[in-house]
Image (spheres, rainbow, N blue to C red):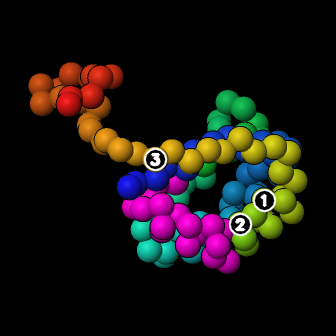
Amino acid sequence: MRVIVAGVLQFPPETAHDSMAAAREHIEGAYTEKGCVHYAWTLDPLNPGRVYVFEEWDTIEDLDVHLNDHWYTDMGAHLQASGLISADVHKYRVDLKQPVYDETGVARAHFKE
């Protein structure tokens, strides 16, 4: 089952940009792991110090390996050293995935069963 990890992290505004730039090695490393589809860390342009994380993993098992791998622990140490203030991050199991736009090009909130 596919897994999404998403959340918001807060850093001191003066360290966030440099922290994300310096995290490149950890981000690229995570992309080498089996099952890593997306591993994105993005600065919020309207809220200084805010960073959004979005990860997509093919399986729960792939995420489990990641959470016990050095890329994860190294990233955690990097974030702490960068002055991480808070983190609100959650994992989601994805049991159904469909495009937002239907076959006519209309955006739809509801899922087709």
- Identify the disc placed on residue 93: 3
Query: Marks 3/1: CA distance?
Result: 25 Å
- Residue 70 included in the magenta stretch of the image: yes
Quadrant into which the N terminus falls: bottom left
Query: Three-letter amino acid code at disc 1?
Result: Leu
Please identify, in this view, whether the residue under mark 3 or under mark 1 is nearer the observer: 3
Secondary structure of the residue carrying tag 2 is helix
Please say if 62 is above or below 49: below
Q: Residue at x 67, y 77 (%)?
A: 70
- Identify the disc placed on residue 75: 2
Q: Quadrant of residue 74?
A: bottom right
Query: Marks 3/2: CA distance?
Result: 23 Å
Q: Which residue is mark 1?
A: 79
Secondary structure of the residue carrying tag 1 is helix
63 left or right, relative to 48 = left
Choose the circle earlier in sequence order: 3 or 1: 1
Report x, y in % for residue 28.
55, 71
Q: Residue at x 40, y 54 (%)?
A: 2
- Residue 92 included in the magenta stretch of the image: no
